[in-house]
Image (cartoon, coloured by chain):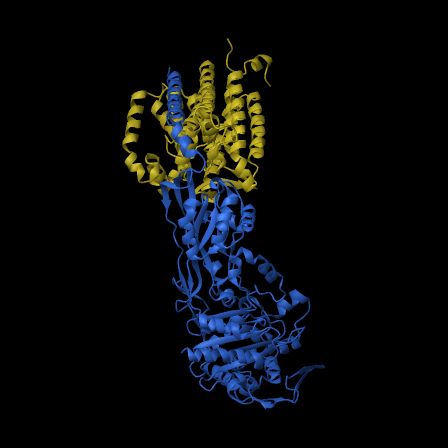
């Protein structure tokens, strides 16, 4: 259990921003799912509320229990997760051309979301044990394998966006751990140069998305449609927005996937730049607080853990918003705390729980 | 410190995102606002035409016709009442009726409300010219399924209906959506994936008057594949008409290729009714009708085949040497087994009968004796060899298997032993034996072609999976005796099927009168023509149609006369 002193060390700002973002998310979801619920009868809001409750309970549990326990279990969790990812490829449910979902007794899971957490745990444990001075190349290679295996399984699904998040997160963790910079830059440079080769490995729909990202008017009814409509929604919000439940793009069904990946365009349309700036500020505050906790902790595991989790959340936020604005290709990454979806919301709240858990156990000055 | 660097990178990215937000929402915001304003951009759904189903000569059995629909777009309809007044003389409906339909069909502000379907072409063009005076009114070309032959072809084509929720979950990955119509029966269901096209759409920006400003995108609808089937529409229509609305089925198939030229079930449903919302009541009545017009009897009516089955029994007994061509049994009108008495349909008796005569007169006593010698195992074997007890595999949905009873089945089903009496009635196609008309078609086509079992099928183009026929090894002399018997059924004055005799073509066949527990017997007439070098097998089945030698034989001769006229025979 937490001591009184530890409880006082709970990072109020981090917790507060999370709760505010959850609140904004639920409001937007109510608006986004308003028409869809009437059409399909699926109770999006109610389901999301249930998951929010479950996720918060889970987060509380994670704060109370010392996170070193999870680090000890991390390799086992990692192995379990690899098994689930393999299972997805064998017997997963296919939607929209990608095999990402696993249904167990009526509950549909997206194991790639949980894979983000377990991989970060495993990498944090692995790198935390090995200071960056001795035999560093072997260590870097080991970390790359730890990240690379689930990444490859997820690429196979295929899920380009999530695989990219793995890359960003791993890179951030290695960077903070103390990887030498010059060789890293050379490897990254080579990576960029090899892009044309990678192109040949992409699926047709991934290529079309990338091409359409460069020019949405290539296919304004197909792949480009979402981006065009999303940008119209976003832009038409202007300064003050059209008001809650009054976004025409949203309510007139112009926005596909508006309750999941494109929830932010609903915020933009209905609340204008006021609303979007507010959300952006909340995310910024959240990430900065996360990094402050990482700086204050003395525990190398804890620091790596936070770096991984916060980078994951940040990568999602940046890519998702860029995608909604048409600045980045549509890769299907949800927005933390706001997008509809149980697996993802749970993942975010677990991440928050772990960050807070590291926070309460940092030395207090 | 590196943590700081990471922090700054993320900060920088969020600033870039904010710059993007600022550009879209503030700098370009006004332009996007204009685009998003109601009725600025619109998606017009362009339904794709479904592929036609053609008969063997290219005559359409089902095709999509372009019809014009008058629709109103709520968000552009400035003064509905005035618009109804103006439209009324043009479409010939009172304004109140238009107002009523508008109210009834209204779904949402932005989706077009259908008002009048099937507008004449001239009216559609007139309205299109007048559109500037009628804001909010549009004319939509809609492909609509039509079945020119109506009820005559319903059993073959099936019909279209809105996709059911459980079907949708299954078919969604293949691009089906809620508003799609899918084949619910017949060829429409069997070849749905071939026939259905891919819908397209038009994405346009329009001004406040609903006039097109610019086209933002266009996705060409893709028509479905056209298919050609082996049905001959004239024969199909005749087969349906000759049954005169009574309950039954009639089919004609090519013995060598298995191609089905006619497959009619009666009474029938009009597939066009399912396309017209105004005919809902008719559909409901059809579903309640005790005569079951939606029930395709040619594939799904499993009933005892009666004496038509004697052809198979005779063959087996000859092949197994249980009887020879010269074996005679004396028919005194009755057959005694222990204390039980089995009657021949001819109470006075047929006298001494050989196998050929037994078939010719459909003498029950002859076959009671034969069946007893053959035993239940022998009859079972022959029934299965000729394809009974399993689906023929015709390319139509929900064909039933029928039933070939055996002692084990009897024990499982009724918990008593198979009695010799069961064998006796099995031998004349009674007992628990159940066959469908299409199965009998296959059985007689095997006899006609000397053992070539070509599974019945319909699709000719695109060529489906090759339906390989199989050559059964049949005993030639046994088959020759059976075929002689079948010829005599029609072509002698004492033959039970003499009413099917034709001056121009020599016909072979077998009558059947299957007794049922209630009502009149079922009438069967199965056979092939020409008798000397068979080309086509036919089956006529009339539920409670009395004696097979009467109506069923008449229907057959009607069909064969037409086939001769058309040059098939």
- Chain B colour? blue
- In the displayed structure, A171 sits above or below B58; it is above
- List x then y, in percent, for residue A247: 48, 32
- Chain A colour? yellow
Q: Kindly indicate the quadrant of the structure image that contains residue B504.
A: bottom left
- List x then y, in percent, for residue A67: 52, 22
Q: Nearer the viewer, residue B55 or B316?
A: B55
Quarter occupied by the C terminus of chain B: bottom left
* Residue A232 visible in the picture: yes
Q: Nearer the viewer, residue B485 or B133?
A: B133
- List x then y, in percent, for residue B224: 40, 55
- In the displayed structure, B72 sits above or below A132; it is below
Q: Residue furthest right?
A: B339
Quarter occupied by the N terminus of chain B: top left
Q: Nearer the viewer, residue A166 or B51?
A: B51
- List x then y, in percent, for residue B549: 57, 82
* Residue A162 visible in the picture: no
Q: Residue furthest bottom?
A: B351
């Amino acid at each position: 259990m937490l001591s009184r002193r530890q409880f006082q060390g709970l990072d109020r700002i981090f917790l507060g921003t999370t709760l505010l973002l959850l609140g904004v998310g639920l409001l937007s979801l109510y608006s986004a799912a308003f028409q869809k619920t009437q059409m399909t009868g699926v109770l999006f809001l109610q389901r999301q509320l249930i998951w929010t409750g479950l996720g918060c309970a889970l987060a509380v549990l994670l704060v109370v229990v010392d996170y070193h326990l999870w680090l000890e279990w991390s390799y086992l969790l990692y192995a379990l997760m690899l098994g689930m990812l393999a299972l997805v490829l064998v017997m997963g449910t296919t939607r929209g051309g990608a095999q990402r979902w696993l249904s167990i007794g009526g509950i549909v899971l997206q194991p790639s979301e949980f894979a983000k957490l377990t991989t970060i745990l495993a990498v944090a444990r692995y790198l935390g044990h090995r200071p960056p001075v001795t035999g560093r190349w072997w260590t870097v290679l080991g970390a790359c394998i730890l990240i690379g295996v689930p990444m490859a399984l997820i690429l196979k699904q295929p899920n380009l966006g999530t695989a990219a998040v793995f890359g960003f997160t791993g890179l951030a963790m290695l960077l903070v751990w103390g990887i030498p910079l010059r060789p890293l830059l050379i490897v990254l440079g080579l990576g960029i140069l090899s892009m044309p080769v990678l192109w040949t490995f992409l699926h047709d729909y991934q290529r079309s998305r990338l091409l359409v990202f460069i020019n949405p008017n290539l296919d304004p009814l197909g792949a480009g449609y979402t981006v065009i409509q999303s940008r119209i929604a976003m832009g038409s919000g202007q300064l003050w927005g059209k008001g809650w439940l009054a976004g025409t793009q949203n309510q007139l069904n112009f926005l596909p996937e508006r309750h999941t990946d494109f929830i932010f365009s609903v915020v933009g349309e209905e609340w204008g730049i006021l609303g979007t700036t507010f959300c952006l500020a909340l995310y910024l505050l959240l990430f900065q607080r996360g990094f402050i906790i990482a700086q204050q902790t003395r525990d190398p595991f804890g620091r790596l853990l936070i770096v991984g989790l916060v980078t994951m959340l940040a990568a999602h936020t940046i890519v998702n918003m860029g995608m909604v604005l048409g600045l980045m290709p549509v890769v299907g990454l949800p927005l933390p705390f706001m997008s509809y979806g149980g697996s993802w919301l749970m993942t975010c709240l677990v991440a928050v729980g772990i960050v807070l858990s590291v926070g309460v156990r940092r030395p207090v000055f | 410190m590196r943590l700081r660097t990471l922090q700054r990178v993320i900060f920088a990215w969020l600033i870039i995102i904010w710059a993007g937000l600022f550009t879209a929402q503030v700098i370009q915001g006004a332009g996007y606002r204009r685009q998003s304003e109601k009725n600025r951009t619109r998606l017009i759904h362009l339904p794709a035409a479904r592929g036609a189903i053609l008969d063997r000569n290219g005559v359409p059995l089902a095709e999509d016709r372009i019809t014009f629909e008058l629709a109103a777009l709520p968000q552009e309809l400035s003064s509905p009442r005035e618009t109804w007044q103006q439209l009324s003389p043009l479409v010939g409906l009172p304004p109140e009726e238009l107002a009523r339909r508008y109210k009834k069909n209204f779904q949402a502000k932005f989706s077009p409300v259908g008002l009048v379907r099937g507008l004449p072409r001239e009216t559609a063009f007139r309205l299109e010219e007048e559109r500037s005076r009628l804001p909010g009114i549009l004319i939509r070309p809609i492909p609509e399924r039509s079945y020119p032959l109506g009820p005559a072809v319903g059993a073959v084509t099936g019909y279209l209906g809105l996709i059911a929720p459980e079907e949708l979950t299954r078919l969604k990955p293949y691009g089906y959506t809620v508003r799609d119509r899918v084949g619910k029966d017949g060829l429409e269901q069997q070849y749905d994936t071939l026939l259905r096209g891919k819908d397209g759409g038009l994405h346009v920006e329009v001004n406040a008057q609903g006039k097109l400003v610019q086209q933002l995108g266009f996705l060409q609808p893709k028509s479905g594949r056209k298919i050609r089937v082996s049905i001959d529409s004239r024969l199909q229509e005749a087969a349906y008409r000759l049954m005169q609305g009574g309950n039954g089925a009639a089919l004609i198939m090519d013995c060598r290729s298995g191609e089905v030229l006619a497959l009619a079930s009666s009474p029938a449903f009009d597939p066009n009714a399912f396309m017209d919302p105004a005919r809902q009541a008719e559909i409901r009545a059809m579903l309640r009708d005790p005569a079951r017009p939606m029930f395709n009897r040619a594939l799904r009516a499993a009933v005892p085949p009666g004496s038509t089955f004697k052809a198979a029994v005779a063959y087996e007994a000859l092949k197994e040497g249980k009887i020879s061509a010269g074996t005679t049994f004396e028919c005194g009108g009755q057959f005694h087994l222990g204390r039980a008495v089995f009657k021949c349909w001819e109470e006075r008796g047929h006298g001494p009968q050989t196998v050929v005569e037994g078939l010719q007169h459909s003498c029950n006593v002859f076959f009671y004796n034969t069946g007893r010698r053959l035993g239940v195992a022998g009859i079972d074997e022959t029934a299965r060899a000729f394809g009974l007890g399993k689906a023929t595999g015709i390319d139509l949905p929900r064909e039933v298997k029928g039933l070939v009873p055996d002692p084990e089945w009897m024990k499982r089903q009724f918990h008593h032993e198979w009695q010799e009496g069961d064998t006796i009635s099995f031998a004349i196609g009674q007992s628990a034996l159940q066959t469908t008309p299409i199965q009998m078609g296959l059985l007689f086509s095997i006899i006609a072609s000397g053992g070539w079992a070509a599974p019945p099928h319909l699709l000719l183009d695109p060529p489906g999976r090759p339906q390989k026929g199989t050559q059964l090894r049949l005993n030639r002399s046994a088959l020759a005796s059976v075929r002689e018997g079948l010829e005599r059924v029609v072509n002698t004055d004492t033959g039970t099927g003499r009413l099917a005799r034709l001056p121009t073509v020599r016909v072979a066949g077998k009558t059947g009168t299957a007794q049922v527990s209630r009502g009149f017997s079922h009438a069967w007439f199965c056979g092939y023509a020409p008798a000397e070098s068979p080309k086509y097998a036919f089956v006529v089945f009339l539920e409670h149609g009395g004696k097979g030698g009467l109506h069923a034989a008449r229907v057959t001769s009607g069909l064969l006369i037409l086939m001769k006229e058309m040059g098939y025979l």
